[in-house]
Each structure stands twice: as C-alpha cells, then as structure tokens.
Amino acid sequence: MSWTRKILRVNLTNGTCESEPLNMEWAGLYLGSRGLATKYLVEETDPTVDPLSPDNKMIFATGPLTGTAAPTSGRWTVVCKGPLTGTIACSNSGGFFGAEMKNAGWDMVIFEGKSDQPVYLDIKNDQAELKDASDLWGKRIWDVEKELIDRSGDKDSRVASIGPPGENGNMFAAIVNDLDRAAGRSGVGSVMGSKNLKAVIVRGTTGVKVDDPMAFMQAVSASNKILEENAVTGQGLPTYGTEVLMNVINGIGALPTRNASDVEFEGAQHISGEAMLEPRESDGEANLVSNHACFGCPISCARRSKMDARNPLIADKERYQVTSGGLEYEAAWALGTATGVDDLEALTYCNFLCNDYGMDPISLGSTVAAAMDLYENGAITDADTGGIALNFGSTDALVKMVEATAKSEGFGNEIGRGSKRLCEKYGHPEMSMSVKGQEFPAYDPRGIQGMGLTYATSNRGACHLRSYTVASEVLGIPEKTDPHVTEGKAGLVKIFQDLTAAVDSSGTCIFTTFALGADDIAPEIDGACEGDWSAENMMTAGERIWNMERMYNIAAGFTGADDTLPQRLLKDAAKSGAAKGLVSGLDKMLPEYYEIRGWDADGVPTDETRQRLSL
C-alpha cells in the first residue's frame, strides 16, 4: 500500500502517454522518490549520455509517504543526469505539486525522448495528454502557472514549469512549482527545456491509502508531537525560517564571504532572518509578511515577503510588488554574502527573479561572486561585462547580472554556464567554489570540518542537503561535536548521508530530522507500506541508494580524484573568527570515509559492499 503501483511513461518523441506497473521488487529495496527513480534511471540510461540529449531521461517521482498524513509529506523529486555537473542529478522540491501527483494515482512520471515542438503534460487522475505549449514558450513561470490553471478550470490544479533559462540551456535552470518551490539544483530545468517540455499540470482526487492505518496514524501523531516540542522545528524555523542561521553561522566564523576569501561578513545582520522582521524606514513595513507551509507541513518554514513599492529596483511595479517567496538562508547567502552585498531589498528582488524565471539562487549567486573575483583580479574587464563594474559589494552589479542571466543577455550568458566553466574560460579554475561542477552552499569547511567532507563526497556535486553535519557540529543535534576537528567526522557524514537518502526517498522533508531520527520516521513508513521497514532496514535502504548513485557516477567517468575541494579551502587558512588559522582537513577524513563506506582506496565500492547491499 501507499505506493500507487503505477508509473506514467511519457514518450515525447512519439507523443504518447502510457501507464505501466511499478516494479515492486525495486520499491522494496529503494523505497521511492530519490532512490526508486534513480534505480529506474540507472537501468534505463547510459551513464555517459549527454545530459541535454533526447537519450537522457527525466523522472518526476513521489515517495510512499508523499500525499499522506505524515508530517511534511509534500516532497517530490526530479532525477536525471545533470548538465551542470555530469553527475547523477536529484533535485527535491516541496509545495503541493508532489502530493497532487500522488493523489492523481502516480508514483512516477518518466519522460523520454524530445518533442519536436513545445508541449506541456496535462494530468487529471488516470488521464494524461500532451498539449501544445507553443504560446507558452518564452513566458515566465508565474505567467505559465496562472495561464494553465485558468485553462484547466480547476483552481486546485498544480503546476511545475520552467522559464526562459530552462529553454535557453542555463546550466542551473530550475523547475518551479507553486510559484516559489523549486527542484533547484544541478540544472534539471535545462533537461526539461532540452526536451521541449514547458510544464506539467496535475489534478488528483483519488487519495492515497496506507497499509496499516492505525499504526500509521499512531506514528504520525508521535512525530507531530516531537516536531511541535522541538526548539528548531517548533519555534526557530516557523519564526525566522532558515534565515535564522545567517547570524549564527557568521558568529562562529564559518560564513563563506566574497567568494570564500573570508569567513565572516560584516553585513550579515542586515540580511538575516531578524532583519526581515524589522520595519523599514521608508514605509514602516517589514520585509517578511508571514510564513507559510508546504503540503502536510507543521513546521511552516517558508517565507512570504513584500518589497517597498517605492524601491527603484522594482522596474515592473505591478509584477514585483507582490507577496511572494521570501529569502531563505542559502539564497540570502549566495546572492548577498558571497557577493558582499548587504541590501535586503536587492536580495529579495533577485530572489523573486529566480522564482519567476526559474534559476537556482545558490549557483547563480556563487557564479556572480566568482565573476567579481575574476574582475577584481583583472581576469575579466569592462569589455567582457558590457561596462558593468563587477566589484564585490556592488548592489548595482549584482542586480544587473541577475537580470542579464535571467534574460540570457550579454555577460549573463557566461554567468548561466556556472562558475566552473566561467573560471576555466578566463584562466582561473581555482576561483570556482564548486565540487564536481556544482557550487557549494553557505557553510565554510574551514570552520565546519564535516561539511568539507560532505561537499567533497556528495554524489550530485557540492551540497548541504546530502549530509547536514551542521546539525551536529553547530546546533548539537542529535549530539554536539566540535566543528574544528576532523576526528569522527567520516562516520558522522556517512550516517547523515544514509539517513538523508532514506528520508528523501520516503517523500518527506529532511528538515524533520532536526527533531526526528530513524526510530521515529521508520514507524511512519512501516505503517504506510507493506514489508518490514524497521529503522535498520530504512538506514540500509539509504546506504544502498548512496552506493548506487556513487556507482552511476563512476560509470559516468568520475573517480576518487573528484572527491576534493577548491584549493582556497585546502590551502588558504581562515583569516578570522573561531576557525582562524584552519584549513579543511579533507586529507585526514577522506581515507577513513572510504574505509567506513566499504570502498577501496580509489573510492570504488568493493565487491563485498555491493553484494551486501544487493547492488
């Protein structure tokens, strides 16, 4: 139960939509969403495929808990080979789209081939049809979502779509649903665009059944109580959102600043969660209007923000004088701290543009920061940028670059290729703060050692949502560890990676793990699904998924040599803060990590490990 046991296979080349049964043997091993979709991708595609070719498949996937009464059960996943990195791409989103897809009766939708003209997929329960989207091509996400819902005649329909960056091959283009929720990382939006697929609209009314309703609801009730009583999930995140971390991480000297040349930002307090609550001098209103929640979420960490109508940044007063998705920590860091800009209104505007056009703000802001680094070191000039002085701290430069990237204009086309390609082109690959081609997020590995190992070994390129050791090293969850030491971090990272893989695959949000452990989440899965989903079996599934992703990347051409960090983090010590004088101790942690994982010295899973995990 809980799985719908149905897959919708959409062949864009032939224009067909066909139902097929879910492979339940695989479901028992890989659970759902991230894990199960990756299994299908591994079995059906060549790992060396060009990510933007018709042969790359793209899978929209829900988990067995998606659309149920489980807390945070709105999560869904996009899996494909990623154009930004060339690795496995698995990008997770919240909102309501995933639950709607599950309630329409589908565990997954597999897209293959390429349409010869722009199309969108219209799903109403068990009916699915490809429709002409020529009139939608070139339009922004907010317009597309409104237009498709109006066409459907059902205001409860949900839409996931791409904007012009996805159509134009931007390497960090996102797929956005519910206006401001996004499958944001690794360029999944460009894979969608390469297939001439503009959007998916879905309406589902069939409901989701669970295997043991009584046991399931008991587990759900227990989890909700823990989430409500926890200081992070019950108080901090609802009040400040993830932006609560800005001052915290800056205070411990682990905030990568000006393209990671520093670890503390003097303007952090101006773009923090606390700052979003403060009344503006101009109109007396706060940037933050309210929090809001995704489907089934008791945490409500998402933001609703509103800009000052008199702000000169707002070129389109009617369009951007709205209450929409406000800043979250990673976006505020990338657009602000990484570039040295501490203008809250400017960052809010740039974040609105990311939602409206469909771009990952982490890679976008980090790439602008790399461009500023190149500019200040003379590697690029005004002649390259079209006369825009790309100095750190320049609000004008930030806004113009974000606008140009969104519209694929001028130097914005270079920004849209990501920092790795940008820095290689201009002769300074060391200035790209990325791993495997993906820009790392808002935690400096010199000040939080576990995050360095996390970035280096992440299967989709640098990512905090694959092993959030910040929980332990900074917040003391589930227990406090010293962020400045390398001892014990290999084991910590493995546990976090395995748990995250399982939680992602369940169809729930990783933020629950601030309060819930495997012993709390496993009973939800066990009550919802057939089979034995003990905490041990859940964690084994997570380990299996992690190793499967690793093996896909190896087959795609990646090696242990790619498990590294930018030289700046390995050689340039932190200049200030609690970690002053420290560099990342990756060289100490990585061999131990390989050993704990059951991999050989080159980072390849051994025969024994593969056999143990049924790979």
Image: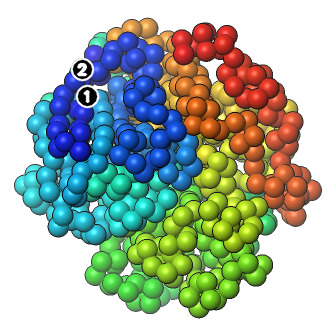
How many C-alpha atoms fall within 10 Å of the one at disc 2: few (<14), some, or many (≥20)? few
Location of mark 2 (residue): 21
Residue nearer the viewer, 410 or 352: 410
Q: Position of residue 490 (x, y in %)?
A: 76, 30
Image height of 275 relative to 500, above or below: below
Image height of 569 relative to 341, above or below: above
Residue nearer the viewer, 230 or 510: 510
Q: Position of residue 501 (x, y in %)?
A: 53, 30
Amino acid identity at mark 1: Ile
| Figure quadrant of residue 578 | bottom right
Image height of 47 relative to 82, above or below: above
How many C-alpha atoms fall within 10 Å of the one at disc 1: few (<14), some, or many (≥20)? many
The residue positioned 47% from the left and 41% from the top of the image is 49
Badge 2 marks a residue whose secondary structure is strand
Badge 1 marks a residue whose secondary structure is strand
Image height of 54 relative to 494, above or below: below
Camera sees residue 372: yes
Q: Position of residue 503 (x, y in %)?
A: 49, 30
Location of mark 1 (residue): 7
Spatial separation of the CA atoms under disc 2 and disc 1: 6 Å
The residue positioned 10% from the left and 53% from the top of the image is 152
Residue nearer the viewer, 290 or 396: 396
Query: Which disc number belongs to residue 277?
Result: none
Quick one: which residue is furthest to the left in this view? 153
Camera sees residue 335: no
The residue positioned 59% from the left and 28% from the top of the image is 551
Residue nearer the viewer, 412 or 319: 412
Quick one: which residue is furthest to the right in this view? 581
Query: Is there a contact, CB below 8 Å, between mark 2 and mark 1?
Result: yes
Going from N to C along the chain, the mark reached first, 2 or 1, is 1
Report the quarter where the N terminus lies.
top left
Q: Position of residue 468 (x, y in %)?
A: 63, 40
